[in-house]
């Protein structure tokens, strides 16, 4: 699926009116979109088996399975945005269409320029939603029963917050953001506070011990924060799946 609005987005028009198919296909192509057409649900399903559009324009009244049923089925199986068209400008049809999963609704007849504006608005909203979800996923790091929210600096275990000191949180964030990588005590201190350890400074070891008591099933046999003797520590988010080095 095309995600970048600066590149050509693909649109599938599902309508049994050949004249409208031709009109929309020609007009949208002139506006820079990649277009395809289908006359009913069966043709739509066949096309979707091989392609993934950025948006679907769908008539409410179709032969066989109607647009409402198709919209509900599409929404249950994915997240392709849908603009519903209908020759019946009934308010009830509009509400039902939106409830069934349509992102917008436009009664026939319509000005193609209005449809174009709605297409662009839906694509912008969809791109913004996808970006927000992506940002949210990047700000959350999961390991075992735990979820680390790096944006809010909170740790949760099975949905319940785990209390950490600011020092423990800073250390856990550095470890979690460098998974499966051995980090020396000096590197950890540099990443956390921006300066090197003084000789015999054991503050990192103390924080490691405290963290283990809070996130490990057995602090003496850690699965997440592992000691690599003579080198430092390694955070293994897969826990038991990773080879033990402690």
Image (cartoon, helix red, strand yellow):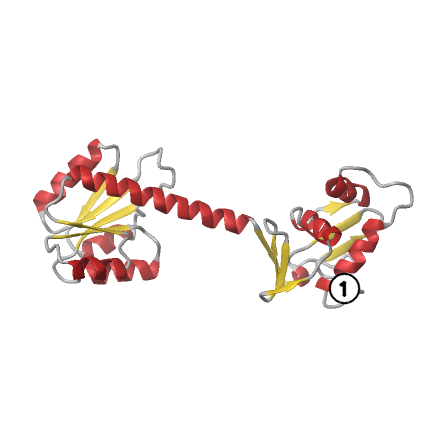
Question: What is the total number of numbered labels drawn onto the structure image?
Answer: 1
Q: Residue at x 77, y 50 (%)?
A: 233
Q: Which residue is mark 1?
A: 213
Side of 216 relative to 17 (left or right): right
Q: Residue at x 51, y 50 (%)?
A: 136
Residue 113 to residue 216: above or below: above
Give x and y (percent) for residue 18: 9, 46
Q: Can residue 182 be seen in the rendering of this structure?
A: yes
For label 1, the crowd category at 10 Å Cα-Cα, with few meaning under 14, some 14 to 19 and many 20 or more, is some
Quadrant into which the C terminus falls? bottom right
Q: Tell which of 47 and 7 is nearer to you.
A: 7
Q: Hey, which residue is sitting farthest right in the picture? A: 200
Side of 129 relative to 73 (left or right): right
Give x and y (percent) for residue 118: 25, 43
Give x and y (percent) for residue 119: 26, 42
Q: Quadrant of residue 222?
A: bottom right
Residue 95 to residue 108: above or below: below
Q: Secondary structure at mark 1?
A: helix
Q: Can residue 1 be seen in the rendering of this structure?
A: no
Give x and y (percent) for residue 94: 19, 57
Q: Quadrant of residue 41?
A: bottom left
Quadrant into which the N terminus falls? top left
């Amino acid at each position: 699926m095309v995600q970048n609005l600066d590149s050509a987005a693909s649109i599938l028009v599902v309508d049994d009116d050949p004249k409208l198919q031709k009109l929309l296909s020609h007009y949208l192509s002139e506006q820079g979109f990649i277009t395809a057409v289908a006359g009913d649900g069966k043709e739509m399903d066949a096309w979707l088996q091989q392609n993934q559009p950025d948006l679907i324009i769908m008539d409410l009244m179709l032969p066989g399975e109607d647009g409402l049923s198709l919209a509900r089925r599409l929404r249950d199986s994915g997240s392709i945005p849908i603009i519903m068209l209908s020759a019946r400008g009934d308010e009830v049809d509009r509400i039902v269409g939106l409830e069934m999963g349509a992102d917008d609704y436009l009664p026939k007849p319509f000005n193609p320029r209005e449809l174009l504006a709605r297409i662009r608005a839906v694509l912008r909203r969809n791109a913004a939603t996808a970006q927000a979800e992506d940002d949210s996923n990047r700000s959350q790091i999961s390991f075992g029963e735990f979820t680390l929210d790096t944006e809010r600096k909170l740790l949760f275990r099975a949905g319940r917050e785990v209390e950490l000191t600011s020092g423990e949180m800073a250390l856990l964030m550095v470890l979690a953001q460098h998974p499966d990588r051995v980090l020396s005590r000096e590197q950890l201190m540099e990443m956390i506070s921006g300066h090197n350890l003084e000789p015999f400074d054991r503050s990192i070891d103390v924080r490691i011990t405290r963290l283990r008591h809070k996130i490990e099933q057995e602090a003496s046999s850690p699965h997440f924060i592992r000691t690599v003797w003579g080198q430092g520590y390694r955070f293994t988010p897969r826990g038991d799946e990773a080879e033990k080095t402690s």
